[in-house]
Image: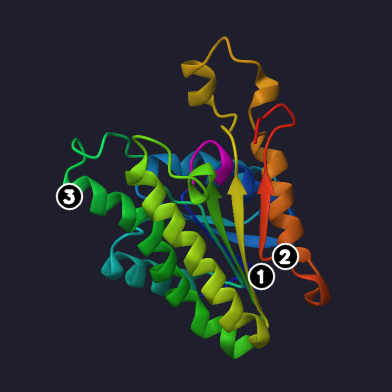
């Protein structure tokens, strides 16, 4: 049964950016559908949101599977309502030289980094088109713009996601749906990143809460001045 609140679906929720996005939109009055492959990464975020009086539900799903996405978003519509916003933050990191990448690993990285963006959009767009409004935001990376050595497995999917966002924005903008792509050009400050790079200056990492504010701003933009793409990086990042 629908909660009656505005609904945001966040795909790719973990302890970093996904959590920050969920908390920011929950504090903005949204009921939050938390989606990730592993239920264990969702429950702490759901508990945190419920702790300050927000509404959140957890959905373990594979964003790269059409069947899984379809079943999951059917549950979201039934339990929370049709999403007014979709934040696609799922990603798969696959590094390796061209002769080292298996076809299976290459395809799976593309499916998560790109195909999932299409599948989840197709799941929310009927409701958005019926309403005549909606927001879809995709999380990009440095690899959305530059294919570095040994990162073809990541860059191909991220390049494709950026192209998808551009095509969708041109098609759907006139119908009231704001589609935006965010180039996150740098490392995100997460517990895992802190553990891996203990000696790194925290000012060289992007704060998840700061990124989440930029997503909220994109969602809140007046239709007379929509951004299709923004790039975010620490002040110390070279570019």
Q: Quadrant of residue 67?
A: bottom left
Q: Is residue 82 visible?
A: no
Residue density around tag 3, few if under 14, some if 14–19, many if 20 or more, within 10 Å? few
Q: Is residue 204 visible?
A: yes
Q: Nearer the viewer, mark 2 or mark 1?
A: 2
Taking the image as shown, residue 41 lies to the left or right of residue 7, namely: left
Q: List x then y, in percent, for residue 145.
A: 53, 50
Q: On the image, numbered disc 3 is attached to which residue?
A: 103
- Above or below, 66 relative to 142: below
Element under disc 3: helix
Contact flag, marks 1 and 3 (Cβ < 8 Å): no
Q: Which mark sits nearer the N-terminus, 2 or 1?
A: 1
> Nearest the camera: 132 or 41?
132
Q: Residue furthest top?
A: 199
Kind of element beneath mark 2: loop
Q: Residue at x 32, y 60 (%)?
A: 64
Magenta stretch holds residue 17: yes
**Where does label 1 land, which residue?**
5
The reply to whether the C-beta atoms of the residues labelled 3 and 2 are less than 8 Å apart is no
Q: Position of residue 165 (x, y in %)?
A: 53, 67
Residue drawn at (57%, 9%), measured in percent from left and top?
199
């Amino acid at each position: 049964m629908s909660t009656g609140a505005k609904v945001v679906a966040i795909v790719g929720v973990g302890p970093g950016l996904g959590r920050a996005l969920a908390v920011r939109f929950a504090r903005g009055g949204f009921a939050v559908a938390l989606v990730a492959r592993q239920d264990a990464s969702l429950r702490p975020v759901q508990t945190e949101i419920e702790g300050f009086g927000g509404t959140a539900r957890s959905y373990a799903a594979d964003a790269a599977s059409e069947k899984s996405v379809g079943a999951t978003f059917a549950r979201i519509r039934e339990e929370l309502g049709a999403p007014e916003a979709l934040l696609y933050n799922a990603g798969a990191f696959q590094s390796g030289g061209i002769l080292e990448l298996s076809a299976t690993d290459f395809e799976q990285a593309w499916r998560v980094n790109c195909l999932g963006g299409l599948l989840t959009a197709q799941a929310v767009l009927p409701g958005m088109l019926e309403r005549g409004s909606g927001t879809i935001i995709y999380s990009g990376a440095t690899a959305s713009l530059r294919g570095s050595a040994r990162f073809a497995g990541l860059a191909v999917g991220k390049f494709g996601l950026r192209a998808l966002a551009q095509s969708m924005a041109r098609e759907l903008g006139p119908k009231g749906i704001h589609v935006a792509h965010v180039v996150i050009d740098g490392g995100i400050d997460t517990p895992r990143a802190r553990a891996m790079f203990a000696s790194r200056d925290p000012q060289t990492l992007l704060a998840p809460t700061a990124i989440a504010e930029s997503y909220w701003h994109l969602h809140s933009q007046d239709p007379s001045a929509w951004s299709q793409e923004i790039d975010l990086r620490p002040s110390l990042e070279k570019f």
